[in-house]
Image (cartoon, grey):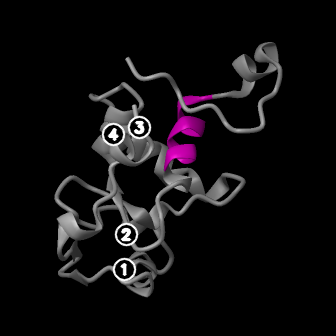
Amino acid sequence: MKQPVIPKKQAPVKDRLKTHSFFDDVWEVARQIPAGRFTTYGTIANYLGTGLSARMVGWAMNGAAHATPMVPAHRVVNRNGMLSAKAHFSPPELMQQLLEGEGVIVANDTIVNFEKHFWDPAKELGL
C-alpha cells in the first residue's frame, strides 16, 4: 500500500496526526502536476493507495479553492478526460481556459490527445 504524501515541511508527528488529512494528500499530489499536463481522480486515488476513492478525490478537489498553497484543480479531470468539475469554476469556462492557456486542447468539454498530456504520479513521482 502506498504511503501518504507528507508535505515537505513537517510538523511534529503528534501535531501532524491532528491536522493532516486525505484532502491534504490529494492536494499535495495535484500541486505537482506540471503545467500543460493533467491527471484523473482515479489516478490520484490509486497513487495514494486508495483506488476505490476517486469520488473522495473529487470532493477534495472541490475544496481545493480554500487550500494554501494554491492547488491547480483545473489539471484534474475524470477518467475519460472530461472536464466534469467545470461547474465548480467561476465562470464554468475557466477550467477549459486554464488548460488551453497551458497548451492542452479541449473540444466538447473533453481533453484532446489524452495520452499526450496525461500525467501519472506513479510514473513521475515513483511508488
Q: CA distance from mark 1 to mark 2?
A: 8 Å
Circle nearer the N terminus (2, 4): 4
- In the image, residue 35 lies at what x, y percent? 47, 71
Choose the circle earlier in sequence order: 1 or 2: 2
Labelled pair 1, 3 in contact (Cβ < 8 Å): no
Horizontal placement of 79 versus 30: left or right?
left
How many neighbours does mark 3 have within 10 angstroms: few (below 14), some (14-19), or many (20 or more)?
few
**Relative height, residue 88 to residue 36 (above, below):** above
Q: Residue at x 37, y 79 (%)?
A: 96
Label 2 with label 3: CB-CB less than 8 Å = no
The quarter in which the C terminus is drawn is top left
Three-letter residue code for mark 1: Gln
The N terminus lies in quadrant? top left
Helix, strand or loop for disc 3: loop
CB under 8 Å between discs 1 and 2: yes
Q: Provide the secondary structure element on which disc 1 rests.
A: helix
Q: Is 23 one of the magenta-colored residues?
A: yes
Q: Tell me the tag on residue 96.
A: 1
Q: Which mark is residue 55?
A: 4
Contact check, label 3 and label 4, Cβ < 8 Å:
no
Q: Is residue 4 above or below residue 80?
A: above
Q: In x, y percent, where is residue 85?
A: 36, 62
Residue beneath the point at 19% across and 67% down: 114
Residue 126 marker: 3
